[in-house]
Image (spheres, grey):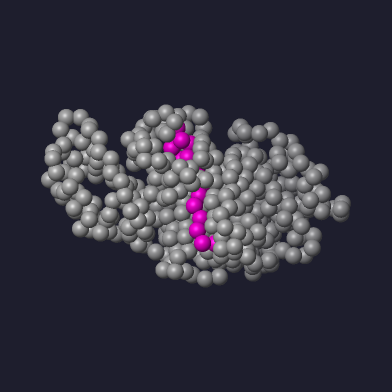
């Protein structure tokens, strides 16, 4: 092993940054052997050195700076680790580092999802590495397996639980029978949800991650605007209970499929069959199920976020980049998006559907609704009718496979029936 170190610069010393540095310090000797040279942090940039950190690491005063640009301009630093998050100033710093001939490792999902094309092209232009394993699913290895281990496959379909906050909330609703607001408050109290949880509960975080995964898996550039999105704020305790009675559990899934008509890309709540491997993934855990043309079904499972899991993913990328530096092999093709496949509109999605309606408790209501659905080309697989309060009752339907456009058309006609008070909720079903 060579004795001269490879110098690292760290941008952002919050949760992920401190977890990355702790991982390096705790496993320094092993990491040096795997990298082929010692790895030494020269500079760490952060805007607030007084704020508390979730882990304690040794960092000297001469390593600290508040000037992030000092890191990307330092001629000794060969690998810049970006843990700031968000689009700016992270984007400007990453691009400056690449233009200065530095390799970059980032855990910034939003940056890669929204500006990945620009960043990859800059890395290719300057023959340096850009790695981002920590950007999706925390400590679960998924980016490199898709790019390397499964490269001989045509990835046909994937579904993932890629947001721990929403999975925790839905798990608690399932276990406790609680409503969404109560489960969210508990998640915030326990530190699993942010004070402003919008990115998580409305699906934006999962959309960024699916855009990254789909771009790699399907070898086609995906913009976040092309991914259909629904959050979980409309899921009620009644829906959770009906799911249980029908043999399902409710999960927020990121779903991608490569079809002859184009890519299906969607994030939304799903009634997921209890027989599916993802159905058993509870709490804050993440999992991604992938179907390949040769390998068949594989699933990646683990902690999708957290200080040390994400730090583990970041350090794995750093070690790989260090090896490439050793052998003069940096700048290998960063992006595997070789085409621009069309993306299907959500109306063209074909699956089963769960529909919950509140109706007047009168004879013949069930038949009228069934007739409307049938006339619209929507056939029913199962029906539950429950008595509610007063003169109102609830009817729950699960359809056979049908295009979403037909379901939406049918629901408009069902709403117009005098005997129907409201469509309480509806969701897609995956077996």
User: Is 167 one of the magenta-colored residues?
Assistant: yes
Magenta highlight range: 155-172
Q: Residue at x 21, y 36 (%)?
A: 393
Q: Residue at x 63, y 65 (%)?
A: 152
| 119 shown above or below 65 | below
The reply to whether residue 383 is in sight is yes
Would residue 131 appear left or right of 185 to someone viewing this image?
right
| Residue 133 placement (x, y as % from top left) | 62, 52
User: Is 395 one of the magenta-colored residues?
Assistant: no
The reply to whether residue 90 is in sight is no
Q: Nearer the viewer, residue 62 or 133?
A: 133
Q: Residue at x 48, y 49 (%)?
A: 206
Q: Nearer the viewer, residue 22 or 296?
A: 296
| Residue 30 placement (x, y as % from top left) | 80, 45
| Residue 234 placement (x, y as % from top left) | 34, 41
Would residue 387 appear left or right of 50 to someone viewing this image?
left
| 176 shown above or below 263 | above
């Amino acid at each position: 092993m060579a004795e001269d170190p490879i110098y690292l610069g760290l941008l952002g010393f919050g949760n992920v940054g401190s977890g990355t540095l702790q991982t390096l310090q705790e496993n320094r000797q092993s990491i040096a052997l795997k990298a082929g040279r010692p790895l030494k942090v020269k500079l760490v940039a952060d805007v607030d050195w007084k704020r508390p950190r979730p882990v304690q690491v040794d960092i000297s005063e001469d390593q600290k700076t508040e000037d992030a640009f000092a890191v990307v301009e330092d001629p000794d630093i060969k690998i810049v680790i970006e843990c700031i998050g968000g689009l700016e100033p992270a984007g400007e710093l990453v691009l400056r580092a690449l233009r200065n001939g530095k390799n970059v490792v980032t855990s910034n999902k939003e940056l890669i999802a929204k500006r990945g094309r620009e960043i990859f092209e800059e890395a290719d232009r300057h023959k340096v590495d850009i790695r981002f394993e920590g950007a999706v699913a925390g400590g679960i290895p998924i980016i490199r397996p898709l790019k390397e281990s499964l490269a001989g496959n045509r990835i046909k379909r994937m579904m993932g639980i890629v947001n721990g906050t929403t999975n925790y909330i839905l798990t608690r609703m399932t276990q406790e029978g609680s409503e969404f607001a109560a489960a969210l408050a508990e998640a915030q109290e326990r530190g699993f949800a942010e004070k402003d949880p919008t990115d998580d509960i409305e699906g934006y975080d999962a959309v960024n991650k699916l855009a990254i995964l789909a771009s790699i898996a399907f070898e086609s550039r995906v913009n976040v605007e092309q991914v259909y999105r629904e959050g979980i704020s409309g899921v009620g305790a009644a829906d959770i209970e009906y799911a249980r009675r029908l043999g399902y559990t409710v999960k927020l899934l990121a779903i991608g499929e490569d079809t002859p008509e184009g890519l299906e890309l969607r994030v939304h709540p799903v009634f997921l069959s209890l027989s599916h491997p993802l159905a058993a993934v509870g709490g804050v855990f993440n999992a991604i199920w992938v179907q390949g043309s040769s390998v068949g079904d594989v699933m990646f499972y683990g902690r999708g976020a957290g200080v040390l899991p994400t730090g583990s993913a970041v350090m794995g990328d750093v070690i790989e980049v260090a090896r490439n530096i050793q052998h003069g092999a940096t700048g290998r093709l960063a992006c595997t998006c070789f085409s621009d496949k069309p993306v299907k509109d959500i109306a063209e999605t074909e699956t089963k559907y769960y529909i919950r309606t509140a109706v007047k408790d009168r004879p013949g209501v069930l038949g009228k609704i069934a007739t409307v659905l049938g006339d619209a080309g929507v056939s029913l697989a199962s029906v539950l009718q429950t008595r509610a309060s007063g003169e109102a009752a609830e009817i729950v339907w699960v359809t056979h496979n049908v295009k979403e456009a037909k379901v939406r058309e049918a629901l408009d006609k069902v709403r117009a029936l005098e005997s129907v008070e409201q469509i309480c909720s509806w969701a897609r079903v995956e077996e």
